[in-house]
Amino acid sequence: MNYTKISFKLNPDNQENREILIAVLSDLAFESFDESEDFVMGYVPGESVNLQEIKDITTALPFSVDTDNEVIPDQNWNEVWEKNYFKPLLIGNRCLVRAPFHTEYEPAEFELVIEPKMAFGTGNHETTTLVAEQILKMELEGKTVLDMGCGTGILGMLASLKGAKSVTAIDIDTWSFESTVENSRLNNIFNIEAKLGDAGLLGAETYEIIFANIQKNVIIKDLPAYEKVLQSGGNIYLSGFYAQDMPDIKRKAESLGLIETGYQEKNNWVVYSFKKP
């Protein structure tokens, strides 16, 4: 399938404005987003993109946004990733993340095979690594886990390998849902239930552990829903934001009665943990 890549140039360009842009565009037909030093890039399946709808949304924002678009022909994504991006990755000296085409790697205690496509989430980003390192330290045997913003399913799968009883993996992007299903099967993991949607899918079921590796604005908006389904004594691990965003996250979490239990930082990215009394 061909994709349309739309590049957004922000002025002023900062993390908060990038998060706002991605949040307001998430309800459109974008399958995934990526960021570079100068641009936010969105990917839409096919070539029929409603550019006017996108312009109407971006024009209403409190900062300026210039756009450019190009069609990306269908291609062998394994080959693209193998040549340009995805190398075997060892997290916490215990978990190896690799693609099916990797043939040279050292064995590890845990191993996850990720089928690379348009989806991003191979563990190379600091936030994924930070949460994965936390999972490696956890006692998860027999516990129920919720993975919000699951991406390729890497965090939920690692939780399963660590002994989680069941994992619910939720993402708003179709590619994330499909990748989580495919990667779970690829790794012979069968206790992950992938769902396509957002926090509105959360109902009566409760969880002992929650991961939410998304964006600051989404986390703040959806944190009440996460708190509602977090069991008493349960822990929630929040990531996808910078260290300077921690006061806003803490303020919201504590307003819901959650208690700060610690954080870990890598290159200014953070995983921030809280406990429900």
Image (spheres, grey):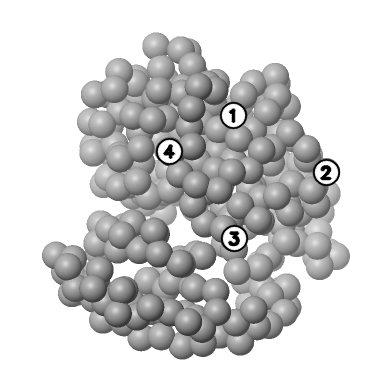
Which amino acid lies under the numbered mark 4 shown in the image of this protein? Gly
Instruction: Return the disc, 2 or 1, that comes first in the chain's sequence.
Output: 1
Dot 3 falls on a residue whose secondary structure is helix
Mark pair 4, 3: CA separation: 19 Å
Q: Which mark lies nearer to you, 1 or 4?
A: 4
Q: Residue at x 14, y 65 (%)?
A: 62
Q: Which mark lies nearer to you, 3 or 2?
A: 3
Instruction: Return the disc, 1 or 4, that comes first in the chain's sequence.
Output: 1
Dot 1 falls on a residue whose secondary structure is strand
Residues 109 and 256: in front is 256
Question: What residue is disc 2 on?
Answer: 188
On screen, residue 246 versus residue 200, left or right, reads left
Instruction: Return the disc, 2 or 4, that comes first in the chain's sequence.
Output: 2
Mark pair 3, 2: CA separation: 20 Å
Instruction: Return the disc, 3 or 2, that comes first in the chain's sequence.
Output: 3
Dot 2 falls on a residue whose secondary structure is loop
Dot 4 falls on a residue whose secondary structure is helix
| Residue 138 horizontal/vertical position (percent) | 61, 26
Total numbered circles: 4
Which amino acid lies under the numbered mark 3 shown in the image of this protein? Trp
Q: Which mark lies nearer to you, 2 or 4?
A: 4
Graded by Cα atoms within 10 Å as few (under 14), some (14 to 19) or many (20 or more), the crowding at tag 4 reads: few
Q: Which mark lies nearer to you, 3 or 1?
A: 3
Question: What residue is disc 4 on?
Answer: 200
Question: What residue is disc 1 on?
Answer: 145
Residues 257 and 111: in front is 257
Question: What residue is disc 3 on?
Answer: 175
